[in-house]
Image (cartoon, rainbow, N blue to C red):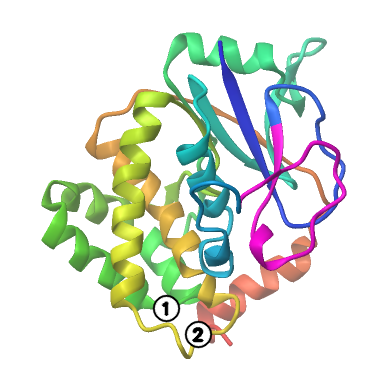
């Protein structure tokens, strides 16, 4: 299989240096080049590199969609990868290899990470507590106007207490073309109609955040067959701080 997995990064970091992994610097048009050997840049050819502060890792996805021709294209992050099975004990405890990915793709054309579960709040509530309700409300208006067939899935996803997050996936090329054509049309329309001039730097990453919630909308509407694989987070997490921030947003509101 001709598979390429883009590793989106904005800083020098240790990462796999063998195929199918391809490190790519996001926001390259706005920053000095990174020193990772063989790293790609998202500002060459057809690109939206300068939108990185608002589109996050999607500038890498857009670049790969427009400039690569592999049969399968994937997106992961320098801190977060699909997990591979460790043969002894059958544990998901290492970064997925080409063989791991090929075996999964033989069964279905799309790989997604295990769903993130919120348990006590819906996808919509979780987003609103962390960001701005108008982001999703305006997105729904755009879907109603341009893609009404996607509204039932959007409403269902917003009411769900779990979802595929992180803009991580591997897709067969024809499906990737379909997804990106739809996704970027929605996001570019949202960008034109949403006033983010007063947003904090974090909330200004809105189009990356919204796209995380739109992936399942596209998957459900198009009845995409996929395989879930666990993901690995490569840096330590401060769960006490993370939990405290969640409770603050939940009961006090975002700062």
Q: Is residue 178 magenta?
A: no
Label 1 packing within 10 angstroms: few (<14), some (14-19), many (20+): some
Q: Residue furthest front?
A: 45
- Report, in whole angstroms, how far the alpha carbon at label 2 lies from the one at label 1: 9 Å
When asked about the image quadrant of residue 224, the answer is: top left
When asked about the image quadrant of residue 196, the answer is: bottom left
Is residue 122 visible to the viewer in this orientation of the structure?
Answer: no
Residue at image x 67%, y 11%? 99
* Residue of label 1: 132
Q: Secondary structure at mark 1?
A: loop
Q: Nearer the viewer, mark 2 or mark 1?
A: 2
Residue at image x 42%, y 74%? 128
Q: In the rendering, which numbered label is found on residue 199?
A: 2
Is residue 198 visible to the viewer in this orientation of the structure?
Answer: yes
When asked about the image quadrant of residue 11, the answer is: bottom right
Residue at image x 63%, y 40%? 76
Above or below, 25 relative to 231:
below
Above or below, 74 relative to 96:
below
Q: Residue furthest bottom?
A: 198
Q: Nearer the viewer, residue 251 or 50?
A: 50
Quadrant, the C terminus: bottom right
Residue 175 in the image, given as x and y percentages of width and height: 35, 29
Q: Is residue 39 left or right of residue 203?
A: right
Span highlighted in magenta in the image: 22-42
Query: Mark 2 touching mark 1, by CB under 8 A?
Result: yes
Q: Is residue 74 left or right of residue 189?
A: right
Residue 192 in the image, given as x and y percentages of width and height: 31, 73
Residue 7 in the image, given as x and y percentages of width and height: 68, 40
């Amino acid at each position: 299989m001709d598979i390429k997995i883009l590793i989106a990064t904005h800083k020098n970091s240790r990462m796999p240096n063998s195929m199918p992994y391809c490190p790519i610097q996001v926001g390259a048009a706005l920053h000095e080049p990174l020193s990772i050997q063989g790293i790609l840049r998202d500002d060459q050819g057809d690109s939206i590199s300068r939108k990185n502060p608002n589109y996050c890792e999607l500038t890498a996805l857009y670049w790969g969609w427009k400039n690569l021709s592999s049969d399968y294209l994937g997106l992961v992050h320098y801190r977060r990868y699909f997990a591979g099975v460790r043969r002894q004990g059958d544990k998901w405890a290492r970064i997925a290899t080409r063989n791991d990915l090929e075996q999964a793709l033989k069964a279905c054309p799309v790989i997604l990470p295990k769903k993130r579960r919120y348990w006590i709040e819906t996808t919509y509530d979780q987003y609103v507590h962390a960001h701005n309700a108008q982001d999703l409300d305006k997105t729904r208006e755009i879907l109603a106007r341009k893609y009404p067939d996607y509204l039932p899935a959007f409403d269902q996803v917003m009411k769900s207490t779990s979802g595929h997050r992180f803009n991580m996936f591997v897709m067969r090329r024809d499906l990737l073309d379909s997804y990106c054509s739809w996704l970027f049309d929605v996001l570019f329309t949202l960008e034109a109609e949403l006033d983010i001039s007063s947003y904090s730097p974090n909330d200004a990453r809105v189009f990356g955040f919204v796209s995380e919630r739109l992936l399942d909308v596209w998957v459900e509407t198009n009845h995409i067959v996929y395989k879930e694989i666990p993901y690995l987070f490569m840096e330590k997490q401060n769960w006490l701080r993370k939990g405290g921030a969640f409770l603050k947003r939940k009961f006090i509101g975002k700062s």
